[in-house]
Amino acid sequence: MTAVERPPVGFATDRRATLGTLVLAASAFLIVTTEFLMVGLLPGLARDLDVSISTAGQLITLFAFTVMLAGPPLTAALAHLDRRKLFAAILALFAASNALAALAPNIGVLAVARFLPALALPVFWGTASETAASMVSPDRQGQAVARVYLGISAALLLGIPLGTLAADAIGWRGAFWILSAASAAMAFAVLIWMPAVARLPRVDLRQQARIFREPNFLANVALSIMVFTAMFIAYTYLADMLERTAGVATADVGWWLMGFGAIGLLGNWLGGRAVRHSPIKATALFLVLLAMGMAAFSPLAAAPVTLWGALALWGIANTALYPICQVRVMHSVAHSQALAGTTNVSAANAGIGLGALLGGLVIPTFGVSTLGYVAAGVALLALLCVPAVARLQRQAPSA
């Protein structure tokens, strides 16, 4: 029996499943750091390239919208490939694009350097989530996906803040050079340590695309767009909010972002456990916490202790919603879960792009201090949509 003819991946031993998810989590760490490093670099990058903070913020919109549009067709076309080679190729592309970003003489070239990895990111997330889930029994899939998403928490904890601190010490170009070298090294690590998994048969795109006619799936995707729009209206400009609203010194912003990410580790754990019981109820719970944390930022910014309280609530909810949304959307279909997973990544990035865009419009009109209120309002709008999504979920055929 050839690799292509083998059945889908079966449950792996605990040791092999743990190794596989840890390799994927480490890869996710670098990929998410590449995506979100711009959050910490925006103020210095905007000054260096002589553009406004709102203009620089649209590099995040470009990345996000590229992921949104490229994700589903590229994942459907590539999901059948050998996963080790696919993940290694994606990391190699990230290494090359980060090197280009480090060399960029202007914002136009930097935009190209952001566009290229955005093509590959949704392919990674769709296939990595499916690969992690397929290695364990159904009752442990939420935790397996959350373990991969631990890479997001690690990026928020270490990647983005340390990148910000590195940019302050050696410049934003130096931060991209470090990320390029680390991505290249991880590409080799995937080839060496990633356990082999069975290749899935190639499925016709039209057959996979049937999920786009399922109301329950479409409603869950729409909810993810709203959730991530709420999250990134404010989070895109968090470094700027810390500087201008809370009065944090530029040299200290990285440490504050590190604290935000550290508390997010708790959110990852809580999200992984909550999603086992009910993905839709977990979404509602953490939307409430997210709205409370973001709305409290400006009123509590005057004192470090109270500011940390708002950031803690915000960070826990922010990180928990990543795996919750991914599992919720993947569980809304009975087939083509890789495509469902990458569609959620596209939906998330649609929300990220919209959030960055809306936040960029709010700042010059109402000021950076109002971002938390606007973001909380959108989170509450998403919360109002949860009962309708739950109703469609109950009406959908059992997976």
Image (cartoon, rainbow, N blue to C red):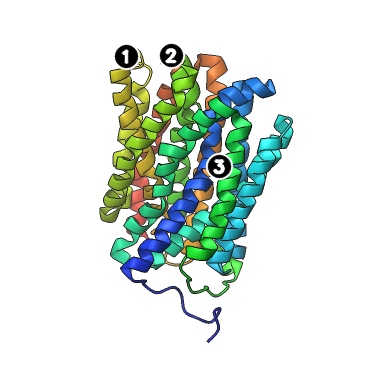
- x, y (%) of residue 175? 57, 35
Residue 303, which numbered label?
1
Q: CA distance from mark 2 to mark 1?
A: 10 Å
Q: Secondary structure at mark 2?
A: loop
Q: Secondary structure at mark 1?
A: loop
Residue 247, which numbered label?
2
Task: Locate residue 180 relative to residue 217 in the image: left or right.
Answer: right
Question: The disc labelled 1 sits on which kind of residue?
Answer: Ala
The furthest residue to the bottom: 1
**Badge 3: how crowded within 10 Å, few (<14), some, or many (20+)?**
many
The furthest residue to the front: 170
Q: Nearer the viewer, residue 131 or 371?
A: 131
Task: Locate residue 313 relative to residue 95 in the image: left or right.
Answer: left
Q: Nearer the viewer, residue 185 or 266?
A: 185
Residues at circles 3 and 2 in contact by the CB criterion of under 8 Å: no
**Badge 2: how crowded within 10 Å, few (<14), some, or many (20+)?**
some
Whichever of labels 2 and 1 marks the residue nearer the N terminus, that label is: 2
Q: Quadrant of the C terminus?
A: bottom left
Whichever of labels 3 and 2 marks the residue nearer the N terminus, that label is: 3
Q: Is residue 149 above or below residue 214?
A: above
